[in-house]
């Protein structure tokens, strides 16, 4: 991991106090028109710790949480206001440092107590000075919320340092190093400088945003009057030069018009390499903002309107002004009529055939019965008498069948005979 740290003082003899023009905390004075929040944001952007924190989230984003998608501006406002975004950042980092107690982390502001307990033994190794707040029976919660944003930035920076020392973070770095090609997010891109004391760096991604940093190396020479000892003191100040498209374009114009060729080359590189990436990100954010505003407008309109119970909208067939649809409709109607007539003809043919069959069988029975009846004046034998009885019985049965068939025919529905039309 590439961290942005202030380099230690290098002196030939005893360390001397740093001169006034090279201070540890770079304070940017705001104009009278700036609001307190704007002044606090400018003050945070003048701290190298903020650049280091943003670089940490850029490098170790897969380990922290893919669902945690916050911008650099949201991180800044979270440090200033100590809001929910700030809590989400710290909770996501604390979950990667064992031992982990999820219940205590999700319980309101209890994560502040966990933060103080975990950082207290490690503070001398990962931060400078004394820890601002320590765990003290719940008083640390109000103490943390009353801190200056720069002190809360110190807590977040120290927590990132402790998270980077865990086993999964080390394995993540080792796996990327063994692949042969180092992931670009592991290092900030140096765009150039004047070769003496000023350098320009470009860092960021599509989630956090992109920023242009300026590193200034200030060297002062102090003289101790009594012993005549000279000492050189170096101080590296880290400044945020650009955070949006307008600022990137302004810095590029200023550097391109500068007299030193090295700075002009930096301006040309910003225009060719950095601005296209920032412009693409800027357009993406504009689309997201417009989409969000449109959704909020739809929700507000729906809430303001009274609830009406109406029918659901039906899908209407689009109108066509050609003869194709009309011809198709006529053809389908003719085919349906032809099929209906054909079915009616088949039904009438079957009915007439059944009637003819029943009439023919009755006439045959009558003829047979008249032939079998003996003439008058003749006595029929006993076998003939039996035959006559059997024929009479058959006659009665056939008469009943004819009558039953006639009743059924009366009950049948009349069908139209298309042949007669």
Image (tube, grey):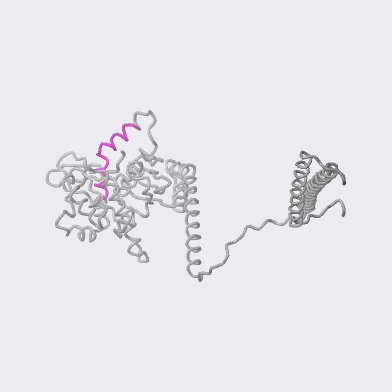
The question of residue 12 being in magenta is answered with no
Residue 327 position, x and y percent, is: 80, 51
Instruction: State the image quarter where residue 99 is shown.
Output: top left
Q: From the viewer's perspective, is 90 left or right of 250?
A: left
Q: Residue at x 50, y 63 (%)?
A: 298
Pick the quarter of the image with the N terminus: top left
Residue farthest to the left? Answer: 226
Q: Where's the C terminus, which quadrant?
A: bottom right
Q: Is residue 135 left or right of residue 335?
A: left
Residue at 31%, 32% in the rendered image: 174
* Left or right for 142, reference 45: left
Image quadrant where residue 199 sits: top left
Asked if residue 335 shows in the view, the reply is: no
Q: Position of residue 405 (x, y in %)?
A: 75, 52
Q: How many marks?
A: 0
For the residue pair 241 and 285, the one nearer the viewer reads as 285
Q: Nearer the viewer, residue 181 or 242?
A: 181
Residue bounds of the magenta highlight: 156-175
* Position in image of residue 28 (x %, y %): 32, 57
| x, y percent for residue 113 | 20, 54
Residue name at image x 48 percent, y 63 percent:
299
Residue 159 within the segment the image draws in magenta = yes
Which of 383 and 275 lies nearest the eye of the viewer? Answer: 383
Residue occupying image coordinates x 44% and y 47%: 255
**SS assignment for the magenta stretch, majority:** helix
Q: Is residue 405 visible?
A: yes
Quarter holding residue 378: top right
């Amino acid at each position: 991991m590439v961290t942005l740290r202030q380099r230690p003082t290098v002196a030939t003899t005893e360390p001397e106090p740093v001169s006034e023009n090279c201070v540890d905390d770079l304070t940017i004075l705001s104009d009278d028109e700036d609001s307190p929040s704007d002044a606090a944001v400018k003050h945070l952007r003048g701290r190298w710790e903020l650049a280091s924190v943003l670089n940490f989230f850029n490098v170790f984003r897969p380990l922290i949480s893919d669902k945690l998608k916050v911008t650099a501006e949201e991180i800044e406002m979270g440090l200033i206001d100590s809001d929910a975004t700030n809590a989400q950042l710290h909770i996501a980092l604390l979950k990667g440092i064992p031992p982990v107690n999820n219940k205590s982390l999700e319980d309101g502001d209890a994560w502040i107590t966990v933060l103080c307990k975990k950082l207290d033994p490690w503070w001398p190794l990962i931060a400078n000075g004394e820890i601002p707040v320590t765990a003290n029976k719940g008083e640390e919660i109000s103490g943390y919320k009353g801190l200056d944003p720069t002190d809360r930035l110190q807590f977040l920076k120290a927590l990132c340092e402790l998270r980077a020392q865990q086993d999964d973070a080390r394995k993540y770095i080792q796996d990327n190093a063994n692949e042969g090609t180092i992931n670009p997010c592991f290092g900030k891109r140096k765009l150039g400088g004047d070769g003496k004391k000023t350098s320009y760096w470009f860092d960021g991604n599509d989630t956090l945003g992109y920023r242009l940093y300026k590193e200034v190396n200030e060297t002062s020479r102090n003289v101790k009057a009594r012993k005549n000892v000279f000492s050189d003191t170096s101080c590296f100040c880290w400044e945020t030069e650009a955070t949006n498209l307008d600022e990137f374009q302004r810095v590029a114009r200023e550097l391109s018009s500068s007299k030193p060729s090295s700075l002009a080359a930096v301006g040309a590189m910003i225009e060719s390499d950095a601005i296209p990436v920032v412009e693409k990100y800027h357009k993406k954010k504009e689309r997201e903002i417009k989409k969000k505003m449109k959704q909020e407008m739809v929700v507000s309109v729906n809430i303001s309107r009274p609830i009406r119970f109406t029918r659901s909208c039906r899908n209407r067939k689009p109108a066509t002004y050609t003869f194709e649809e009309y011809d198709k409709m006529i053809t389908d109607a003719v085919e349906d009529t032809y099929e209906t007539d054909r079915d009616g003809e088949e039904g009438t043919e079957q009915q007439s055939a059944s009637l003819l069959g029943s009439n023919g069988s009755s006439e045959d029975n009558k003829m047979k019965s008249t032939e079998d009846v003996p003439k008058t004046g003749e006595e029929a034998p006993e076998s003939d008498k039996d035959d006559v009885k059997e024929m009479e019985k058959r006659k009665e049965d056939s008469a009943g069948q004819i009558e039953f068939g006639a009743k059924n025919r009366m009950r049948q529905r009349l069908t139209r005979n298309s042949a007669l039309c």
